[in-house]
Amino acid sequence: MEGVTRHLERSKLWSIFTKHAASILIVAFLLHLLHTRYNTQLRRFPGPFLASFTSLWQVWVASSGKAEEYYMEVHRKYGPVARIGPNEISFAAPAAGRSIFKTGQGFHKTEFYTVFLPNNIKDIFTEIGEDVHATKKRYTVPPYSLSSVQQHTAQIDALMVKFLQKLDDFAYQGVACDLGKWLHYLAFDTLGEFAFANHFGFVDAGTDMNNTIATISDSTYESGIIAQMPFVERWTRSIPIWNYLPSGKNKLFLLFNKSTEVLQRFQGKETGEREKCLLRSLLEAHQANPDKFNLNDVLAVSMGAIGAGSDSTASTMNSFCWHVLSNPHAPLSDIVQFHEALELPYFQACLKEVMRLQPAVGMNITRQVPAGGTEIDGVYVQEGTQVALNGWVLHRDKETFGSDADVFNLERWLKASEQELKMMERSLFQFGGGSHVCIGRHLALFEINKTLPQVFRQYNIRVVDPTHPPAHRTGFFYIQDGLRVYLEKR
Ligand code: HEM
C-alpha cells in the first residue's frame, strides 16, 4: 500500500514537472544569468548590460568587424575600467597596460588565442602554456633579431625593385592603383623571403594567388569571433563543420605546400647563405633539440609567422599612406634615402602617430590574472579574471597624448618635451608587451622603414577620394580595403 502511494506521488510530481517543464527551464536559465551577473566581484564594474550575462555580446562585437570602435565607445561611456564579459574587464589607461605586460607578473594568455591558425599544432602565438611557449620562443628568437633580419636586405631590395616597376606601370598609364593591395602583396612576398628564402610571387602575379590573402583574412576574422567563446571550438573540434567555413575549404594550401616543400628540400642538406631563413634556423634548432622542438613545431612556427606578420605589416603601411596622404599637414617631401629613415624625425613622427592612432591589432589582447589576484591601475582584480587591453583605446588616453588624442597630429611627437616624449613612447602598445611582445617587430619596422620612404620619394601620390577612408574589417587585425591612389613619377 505504501509503495503504491509513493508511486502515485512520484508520477504526480513527474506530471507537474512535464506540464511546467518550459517554465522551470526558463526560471533556471534566468537564475543562471543572475548568478553570472551578480555572483562575482566584477559586478562593481560598469559596462554594457548584456556583456555581464554572456560572452555573446563579445561575439556580436567581433562579428561586426569593427571591434576597436565598440571598445573605444565602451570606455568613452563607462570610464577607464569596464566589464565587457561575464569574467572579463577592460582597461583604458596605459599604466594598466604597463602593469599587465610587466615581465614576471604571472599574467598569461587566455584560451582566446587557441582557436587561431595554426591551432592543431601550436606556434608561439597560439601556444598559451607559458612554459611550452618559453621553450618554443627560445628556439625562435634568433632569426627575428634585427641583425638577422638585415641579412635579408638583398632579397628584400630585389622585391622592392619589382614592386616599384609595377607601380611605375600605373604611373605611366595614369590609372588609379589600389596601393593598399600592392603593399599587401609586398608584405606577403617579404615574409616568404624571410621565412622560406623564397617569395611567393604575389608581386610578380599582381593578384592574390589561390585567394591566400583573403583566406588568411577570413580565417582571422572567423577565429576572432569563435575566440570569444573558445569552448565552442573545443567541443566541436571533432565535427567537420569548420571545413564548411569560407576559410576552411581552401585551408591555405599555398602556405602549407610552400612550408612543407621547403622543409623537405632543407632536410639533411647543407644550405648556402642565400637560403638562410626562419625555417632553416628552426630546422637547425630542431636538429639540435629534437625532443624539445619537433618538426611540427618547425612547420607551425614558420607558417604562423606568415599569418601574424602579413596582415599586420600591410595594415600599418595602409594606415600610414592614408593618414599622410589625406592630411595636408603631413607631406613627406623631405625624404631622400630610405636607409636614412631612422634618422628622419618627420617620417618617424608620422609613423609613430599612425601606429598610435591605428594600431594594426584592432581586437583586444587578453590575459588571465595570476593566482592570488593583483592590483591593476589602482583596482584590485581577483585571480582568474580575464583582463583586456586594446591599443586603440590605450592610445587615446588624453592624459598621456593630449586633449587631441582622437585625431592625427604628428606634431605631438615633434613638439613634446623630453619627459612627455618618454611617457608617450612608454604608452605605445602597437606591438603588445612583456613575454609575448611581437617577435616580428624588427622585421616589420625594417620593412616599413624601407618601403614607405622609398615609395614617397619616388612618386607624388594623390588619393582618388580623400573624403572616404578605405573600408575595413577587423578580425584580429584591422584590415583595410580600397586605398586607391594616382601615382606620378617624381
Ligand atoms: C606592424 C606589424 C606588426 C604589428 C603591429 C604586430 C603586433 C603584434 C602584437 C600586438 C602582438 C601581441 C599579441 C598579444 O600579446 O596578444 C604580436 C605578437 C606576435 N607577432 Fe606581431 N605584429 C606585427 C608584425 C609581425 C611580424 C612581421 C611577425 C612575423 C614575421 C609577427 C609575429 C608575431 C608573433 C609570432 C607573435 C606572438 C608572440 C608571442 O606570443 O610570444 N608580427 N604582434
Image (cartoon, grey):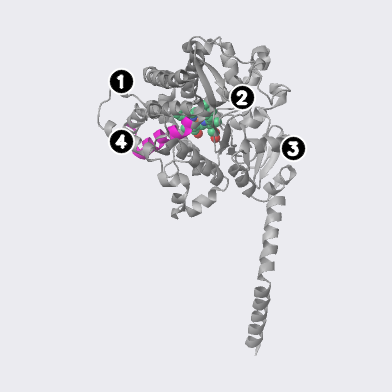
The amino acid type found where label 4 is placed reads Glu
Of tags 4 and 2, which is closer to the observer? Answer: 2
Q: Is residue 398 visible?
A: yes
Q: Which of pointers 2 and 3 indicates the residue nearer the eye?
A: 2
Q: How far apart are marks 4 and 2 (CA)?
A: 44 Å
Question: In the rendered structure, which amino acid carries the disc numbered 1?
Answer: Glu
Q: Which residue is drawn at 65% across and 74% down?
A: 18
First-in-chain label (4 vs 1): 4
How many residues crowd around disc 2 within 10 Å: few (fewer than 14), some, or many (20 or more)? some
Type of the residue with mark 3? Lys
Question: Which quadrant holds residue 21?
Answer: bottom right
- Mark 2: secondary structure: loop
Label 4 CB sits under 8 Å from any ligand 1 atom: no
Q: Which amino acid does label 2 sit on?
A: Pro
Name the magenta segment's main secondary structure: helix
Region of the chain picked out in magenta, as a range: 288-310
Answer with mark 2 or mark 1, whichever residue precedes in sequence. Answer: 1
Which label is found at residue 273? 1
User: Where is mark 2, residue-wise?
Assistant: 466
Mark 4, residue position: 261
User: Which circle's residue, 1 or 3, is located before the other in the chain?
Assistant: 3
Quarter of the figure with the N terminus = bottom right
Residue 421 badge:
none
Give the alpha-carbon distance from disc 1 to disc 3, as whole Å: 56 Å
Q: Circle 1 sits in a helix, a strand or a loop, which is it? A: helix
**Of the residues under marks 4 and 2, which one precedes in the sequence?**
4
Q: Does the magenta stretch include residue 289?
A: yes
- Asked whether the beta carbons under mark 2 and mark 3 sit within 8 Å of each other, the answer is no
Q: Which mark, residue 77?
A: 3
